[in-house]
Image (cartoon, helix red, strand yellow):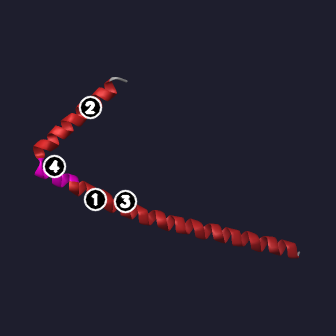
Amino acid sequence: METIKKASKSAHETVDKIANASNQAAETINEKSAELKIAEQQLVETCRGYVRDNPIASLGIAAAAGFFLSRLLSKR
């Protein structure tokens, strides 16, 4: 009977450790997700500012990117 109690206690401790580790992982993922959202917003604002300040260059970049993408995709 003592062996069963020890095994049960060990199993519960293992489950608790796994639950704790998964909770910590989930918290870390949530924090990183928030950081990525902030970085994305900053990048979008930076791009908008560049397009607003340099509309002709932005059009040229977009046209060149479109041209190269069409060339890459048409060869397939």
Gap in Å between the C-alphas at discs 3 and 1? 9 Å
Q: Which quarter shows the N terminus? A: bottom right
Residue where numbered disc 1 is placed: 41
Q: Give the mark, 2 or 3, whose residue is nearer the N terminus.
A: 3
**Label number found at residue 68:** 2
Find out whether the residues at labels 1 and 2 contact each other: C-beta distance under 8 Å: no
Gap in Å between the C-alphas at discs 2 and 4? 20 Å
Q: Give the mark, 1 or 4, whose residue is nearer the N terminus.
A: 1
Res. 71 image quadrant: top left
Give the class, few, some or many, for how many residues have Cα within 10 Å of label 3's Cα (few <14, many ≥20): few
Mark toward the viewer: 1 or 2: 2
Q: Which residues are magenta?
A: 47-54
Mark toward the viewer: 2 or 3: 2
Find out whether the residues at labels 1 and 4 contact each other: C-beta distance under 8 Å: no
**Label number found at residue 36:** 3
Q: Give the mark, 2 or 4, whose residue is nearer the N terminus.
A: 4
Give the class, few, some or many, for how many residues have Cα within 10 Å of label 2's Cα (few <14, many ≥20): few
Gap in Å between the C-alphas at discs 1 and 4? 15 Å
Q: Give the mark, 1 or 2, whose residue is nearer the N terminus.
A: 1
Gap in Å between the C-alphas at discs 1 and 2? 27 Å
- Kind of residue at badge 3: Leu
Q: Secondary structure at mark 2?
A: helix
Asked if residue 52 is among those painted magenta in the image, a careful observer would answer yes
Residue where numbered disc 4 is placed: 51
Give the class, few, some or many, for how many residues have Cα within 10 Å of label 4's Cα (few <14, many ≥20): some
Asked if residue 12 is among those painted magenta in the image, a careful observer would answer no
- Kind of residue at badge 2: Phe
Report x, y in % for residue 13.
Answer: 70, 72
Picture layout, residue 14 above or below residue 52: below
Q: Residue furthest top?
A: 75
